[in-house]
Structure formats: structure tokens, C-alpha cells
Image: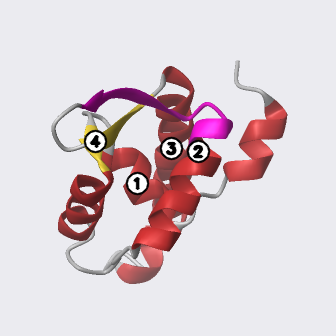
Amino acid sequence: MLNEKILKKYLPLTHTTYYILISLTSPLHGYGIMQKVEELSEGEVNLGPGTLYGALSKLEKDGLIKKIAEEEKERRKSYILTELGMEIIKHEFERLKTLVKRTQHIFTSEG
């Protein structure tokens, strides 16, 4: 069971946080995260370094992501999603799915 305090703090997720977390299902460094977020959001979300690193710091502090070994040559820090981060994403996915399910009749011919 997820900590209620963490759930209340993060849910509903912002677009930016959702895409950052989703991008980290495999290890990525900062620039890679920015590229992946732009790709996943089809250009809707463009992260600047300040926004990204502020978000990464907060997510790491709260245990949703973790830093993994730095790449020696390039001194890049890579990050990956933790189990807690995955649980937060799953909760958000279910929340959005329920929202759509409850309101989809408005936008379909079934009216």
C-alpha cells in the first residue's frame, strides 16, 4: 500500500511529472530524459534544464526515481524509476482511465 502522504502530494500528476516518470522506465541521463519526454508527448512538453533538474531532485528526494552510476567519460548522471515511482504512475494511469470511462459517453455517438 502506498503512503497516503506521497499519493496526495503527487496525484494528480502534472503532464511534466508524468512524462518524466514514464521516460525513466529505462535508465536515462538529463538530456536523454528531455528528448524522451518530447518524443512521448509528441512535442507537447519541452523541458528546460532548470525545470528538469528541479523535478529530478524532488522526485529523487521523495524516492520515485533513483540516481544510478555516472558515466565516467561524460560525467552524466543517469536516473531510473523506482518501485514507488512505478506505483505512482499506475495510480495515475488508473485515475485517468476511470475519468475517461466515466465521461466518454459525452464524446461518442452513443450519447
Task: Give, as a three-letter code, the residue at label 3.
Answer: Glu
As helix, strand or loop, the secondary structure at mark 4 comes to: loop
Look at the numbered discs 4 and 1 and tell me whether their residues touch, using CB distance below 8 Å: no
As helix, strand or loop, the secondary structure at mark 1 comes to: helix
Disc nearer the start of the sequence (4/1): 1
Q: Which residues are magenta?
A: 60-71
Task: Give, as a three-letter code, the residue at label 4.
Answer: Arg
Dot 1 alpha-carbon crowd within 10 angstroms: few under 14, some 14 to 19, many 20 or more: many
Q: Which of the labelled discs sits on residue 94, or is there none?
A: 3
Q: Is residue 106 left or right of residue 84?
A: left
Residue 6 position in % (x across, y down): 75, 38
Q: Which of the labelled discs sits on residue 61, or is there none?
A: none
Residue depth check, mark 2 versus mark 4: number of the one nearer the observer: 4
Q: Is residue 86 left or right of residue 63?
A: left
Q: Which residue is mark 2?
A: 59
Look at the numbered discs 2 and 4 and tell me whether their residues touch, using CB distance below 8 Å: no
Q: Which of the labelled discs sits on residue 75, or is there none?
A: 4
